[in-house]
Image (cartoon, rainbow, N blue to C red):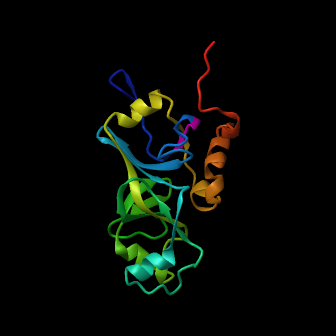
Amino acid sequence: MEVDEGELKMVLKNQFLLAMPGLTGTYFGDSVTYICEHNEDGAMGIMVNRPTHVSLVELLSQLGINTGSTPIEVTIMEGGPVHRDHGFILHTDDKRFESSLILENGLMLTSARDVLEAIADGRGPTDYLVAMGYAGWQGGQLEAELKENAWLTCPANADVLFHTPYADRVATAAASLGIDFKLMSGHAGHA
């Protein structure tokens, strides 16, 4: 967190947002979102635990890219409700592309075709996650949702992003805080 003119300012870039049990049944229920950018204008993130029914091989074929060395098991993720027809590749910084955005902590975000072509040719980054769409919040919106206990935050890590099975990502990220979501209720009690 940064201090700005006497106010406490949240900095959520490179954090995971974990949907609290109260969001179960909503679009973001049971999700973990990696926050790529967060500033006074708003926030942008990629959901990293909701696989689609489309494989990377299928996507590349649809785009007319030779699937060459593409691993057959790579599944496209549902990144969020905004621009679902646009692809975003969250990847390690061992390969950089002209349109890549440096996210820090060894990660980059690229949305250009060249990264997909490199992956298909076996020249891509070591670790990557391909998502369609993203999650976005207007300035102050995410902070308000955090105050309403809609989200829990924790530091992001590459192991959860790239090596943890999709179904285990929420629990693994929560466990980094010593929390077991299975023991939490989505309903507040009253005394």
Q: Position of residue 128 (x, y in %)?
A: 51, 66
Q: Is residue 138 above or below residue 129?
A: above
Q: Position of residue 75 (x, y in %)?
A: 54, 69
Residues 69 and 55: in front is 55
Judge whether residue 44 can be spotted in this image: yes
Q: Is residue 57 left or right of residue 2?
A: right
Look at the image and tell me in which quarter the C terminus lies.
top right
**Residue 18 is a magenta residue:** yes
* Most frequent secondary structure within the magenta stretch: strand
Judge whether residue 2 can be spotted in this image: no
Q: Position of residue 71 (x, y in %)?
A: 57, 78
Q: Is residue 147 above or below residue 69?
A: above
Residues 53 and 68: in front is 53
Q: Position of residue 112 (x, y in %)?
A: 34, 70
Task: Please provide the residue range marked out in magenta.
Answer: 16-21
**What residue do we see at 65% from left, 60% from top?**
165
Q: Is residue 139 left or right of residue 119?
A: left
Q: Is residue 176 above or below residue 52?
A: above
